[in-house]
């Protein structure tokens, strides 16, 4: 099987901050030209400028994965600017607090539209050309809530289950095409995904998680840890497929007895 080409343009959706921004930096450090996309395009441009200042190649574009026209425009802009895409990282996500019974159908639909339908929009924009070229990597940034659900964030939990179902199905459909679909499943990570939450709601989610054993300690991942995992996944030699990576925070070191 031929090796990866020297130039592998990469797309990072949800790249304005946190995990997405760190993924963009890590891929650029690995010599990938990077297209950063998010609704907060000005934040993406700040990250892209930092990458360029460090000697990398990066461009920022507006992207709302919940809107089909936005995804189509993003795909065309990336192709015109960076050329054929070889790596797609689906990191855009929406999470809001609330019980299952207390969540409106409209709130649930909004989360699913971003986290699941948005994923499919992104794949539809880039996958056909990757399959035609018989190479490429797709990476979904999932969550440990898939194997350890937490109460009071039911829409987010259900969306990550559905997104992984989509990717696992895609893995089977891509067999023999040279295109790899991988899942990176982070544990608790210090990001801005809960920005805008009321403190009381955040504390309820944390306490409920502790009750069911999903937060055994207060160790948190830095987004760069997830980014380094993504860089490792897409750099794996041709003929190798890292299908699932589960990244968890190490517990704080305890004092010796």
Image (tube, rainbow, N blue to C red):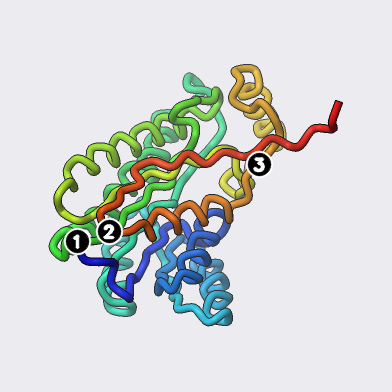
> How dense is the environment of label 1, judged by Cα within 10 Å: few (below 14), some, or many (20 and up)?
few
Measuring from the top left, give residue 104's x and y in whole percent: 44, 28
Helix, strand or loop at disc 3?
Answer: loop
Measuring from the top left, give residue 118's x and y in whole percent: 33, 49
Residue at 45% from the left image edge and 59% from the top image edge: 231
Mark before the other along the chain sequence, 2 or 1: 1
Depth check, mark 2 against mark 3: the one in front is 2
Residue at 49% from the left image edge and 67% from the top image edge: 41
Q: In the figure, 132 relative to 105: above or below?
A: below
Residue at 38% from the left image edge and 52% from the top image edge: 90
130 sits left or right of 216 in the view? left
Mark before the other along the chain sequence, 3 or 1: 1
Q: Which residue is mark 3?
A: 220
Q: Which residue is mark 2?
A: 238
> How dense is the environment of label 3, judged by Cα within 10 Å: few (below 14), some, or many (20 and up)?
some
79 sits left or right of 249 in the view? left
Residue 19 or residue 114, whichever sits in front: 19
Residue 98 or residue 78, whichever sits in front: 78
Measuring from the top left, give residue 16's x and y in whole percent: 52, 62
Residue at 49% from the left image edge and 60% from the top image edge: 23
Depth check, mark 3 against mark 1: the one in front is 1
108 sits left or right of 203 in the view? left
Q: In the figure, 167 relative to 108: above or below?
A: below
Residue 132 or residue 96, whichever sits in front: 132
Residue 213 or residue 66, whichever sits in front: 213
Q: Are marks 2 and 1 in contact (CB under 8 Å)?
A: yes
Q: In the figure, 191 relative to 213: above or below?
A: below
Cα separation between marks 2 and 3: 32 Å
The quadrant in which the C terminus is found is top right
Residue 202: name its quadrant: top right
Q: Which residue is mark 1?
A: 1
């Amino acid at each position: 099987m031929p090796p990866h080409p020297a130039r592998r343009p990469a797309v990072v959706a949800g790249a304005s901050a946190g995990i997405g921004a760190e993924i963009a930096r890590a891929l650029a450090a690995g010599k990938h030209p990077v297209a950063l996309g998010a609704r907060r395009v000005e934040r993406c441009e700040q990250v892209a400028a930092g990458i360029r200042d460090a000697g990398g190649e990066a461009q920022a574009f507006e992207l709302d994965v919940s809107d089909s026209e936005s995804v189509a425009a993003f795909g065309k802009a990336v192709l015109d600017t960076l050329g054929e895409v070889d790596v797609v990282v689906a990191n855009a996500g929406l999470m809001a607090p609330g019980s299952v019974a207390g969540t409106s159908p409209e709130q649930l639909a909004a989360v699913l539209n971003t986290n699941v339908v948005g994923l499919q929009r992104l794949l539809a924009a880039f996958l056909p050309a990757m399959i035609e070229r018989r190479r490429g990597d797709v990476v979904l940034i999932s969550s440990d809530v898939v194997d350890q659900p937490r109460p009071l964030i039911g829409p987010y939990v259900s969306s990550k289950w559905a997104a992984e179902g989509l990717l696992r199905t895609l893995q089977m459909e891509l067999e023999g095409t040279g295109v790899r679909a991988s899942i990176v499943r982070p544990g608790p990570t210090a990001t801005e995904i809960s920005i805008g939450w009321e403190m009381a709601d955040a504390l309820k989610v944390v306490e409920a998680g502790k009750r069911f054993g999903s937060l055994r300690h207060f160790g948190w991942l830095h987004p760069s840890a997830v980014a380094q995992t993504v860089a490792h996944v897409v750099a794996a030699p041709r003929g190798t497929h890292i299908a699932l990576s589960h990244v968890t925070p190490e517990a704080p070191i305890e004092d010796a007895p």
